[in-house]
Image (tube, grey):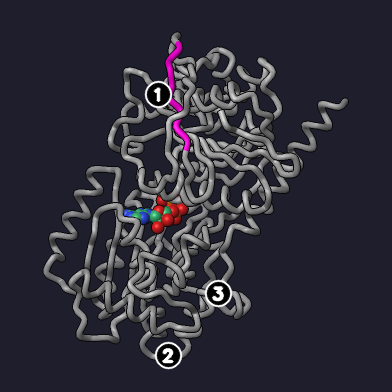
Amino acid sequence: LTLSGNSSGLHVVHIAAEMAPVAKVGGLADVVAGLGKALQTKGHLVEIILPKYDCMQLDQITNLKVLDVVIKSYFDGNLFSNNVWTGTVEGLPVYFIEPQHPSKFFWRAQYYGEHDDFKRYSYFSRAALELLYQSGKKIDIIHCHDWQTAFVAPLYWDIYATRGFNSARICFTCHNFEYQGTAPAPDLSYCGLDVERLDRADRMQDNAHGRINVAKGGIVYSNIVTTGGHGLQDTLKMHSRKFVGILNGIDTETWNPSTDRFLAVQYSATDLQGKAANKTFLRKQLGLNTEDTSQPLVACITRLVPQKGLHLIRHAIYKTAELGGQFVLLGSSPVPHIQREFEGVADQLQKNNNIRIILKYDEALSHCIYAASDMFIIPSMFEPCGLTQMIAMRYGSVPIVRKTGGLSDSVFDFDDEKIPVELRNGFTFARTDEQDLSSCLERAFSYYSRKPMVWKQLVQKDMQIDFGWDSPASQYEDLYQSAVAQARGVAQT
Ligand code: ADP
């Protein structure tokens, strides 16, 4: 193996189910790549371990090759071989684990949503740790993300630390506590964890009878836990000493309108002509009406799941049309009945040339929509952090968001006199009913059409806000350093 140490910085390994742009479903992918790059820039040795999915974007990996080692990992009473591939993604060294298990865990033509997700990711977590263990390197931080790799925390302390692989401290980030990874308690044993030991209220037992909760295990068995909510308040409270909320950043290289290769024309805050050109281009590309240049273009780019406020997204489409604007929705749903519902809306509005509903995942198109749009709508029911509001602002699309979670930490209403003028950067509404969203949209439309100079200044201001990873990565760095220092202190006593 080629894992190598670095004397000055920390050796940090992220174990995750997603990473942009090779394997992206949502914000998790952006976070793993963005945080990884920022930590690398700060002088740390950062490596990533991902499953080798058949549906990955292989063209986003440079120097992909299979290593000349086979890692054997435990699963359900047997040892299975894993091929290990390496490659570079966004300048970061990545290891891809390809299990040789008959269930073909990552050969499913999709990332998630399989009946055996719990098994697949418990397998991956165990194999990833086995890879690190066999590499023999002295790792400082193992950072796991979301329930899919939260297995790493109990596996590390219960199985690997006792074998002498114990230099690392574990950081667990739960990007979205809506997904906690629960299963009947006995399923935990597949990856070698001791169900009897862990099926306890203060360990991994779920609130639902007879079930086990992996995100809970991530909290209990990690040294550092970041972000939170959703039903695990008691467990989080108990572990509050190690629990920290950090607002994510965005990767300002990937998301940079002045260099973005997906755009028809690059632009910046001092050259908004380019933004207008992107709008014209997208309207033509999507077959939207191009005669009336005064119409604002409202966009929404999202996974279509209940968390995102589906009834309000639907309402925003109709309300925008009523107000004389144009609307583009780029959304994909892992839930078949939601996908069908939006297909119904799309059919109904097919002939309306002010509305386009595009139901798929499309990275390139997402960049063009951020660039072309004037307003960006995010009516989430809850939002642990949210990245699209930050990306939208960087591209000069003014966010219209529901005041919740990370959205209310990053978007401040233009008309709210309690907030310092320099922080006001978008439009917000509080309630989950259609009326509150309607009046918020009306306010935004009114500025757009009646006060174009004020609007332009708002766009320019939004584009200049620093949403980069530098500051959040420094917060992670501090957490890592103190966990490592604490561990060394303990080791010396
Ligand atoms: P979540 O992680 O809950 O999906 P975030 O706001 O944290 O939400 O991150 C969403 C990320 O996924 C953004 O980078 C957004 O541009 C991207 N995204 C969501 N849906 C799509 C889609 N249909 N096509 C392309 N990109 C999408």
Please determine whether, in this image, residue 423 is positioned above or below residue 401.
Answer: below
The residue indicated by pointer 1 is 99
Expressed as whole percent of the image width and height from the top left, the position of residue 246 reads 62, 52
The residue lying at 47 percent from left, 46 percent from top is 89
Q: Residues within 10 Å of mark 1 (few under 14, many from 20)?
A: many
SS state under label 1? strand
Please report whichever mark, 2 or 1, sits nearer to the chain's N-terminal start: 1
Query: Pointer 2: what residue?
Result: 451
Q: Amino acid at mark 3?
A: Gln
Comparing labels 3 and 1, the label whose residue is closer to the camera: 1
The furthest residue to the top? 77
The dot on residue 464 is 3
Q: Nearer the viewer, mark 2 or mark 1?
A: 1
Numbered mark located on residue 301 in the image: none
Amino acid on which the number 1 mark rests in the picture: Pro
Chain part drawn in magenta: 79-86
- Main SS of residues in magenta: strand
What is the number of callouts on the image?
A: 3
For the question of whether residue 180 can be seen, the reply is no
Any part of residue 33 in sight: yes
The mark lying in front, picked from 2 and 3, is 3
Q: Position of residue 267 (x, y in %)?
A: 43, 77
Quarter that holds the N terminus: top right
Amino acid type, label 2: Lys
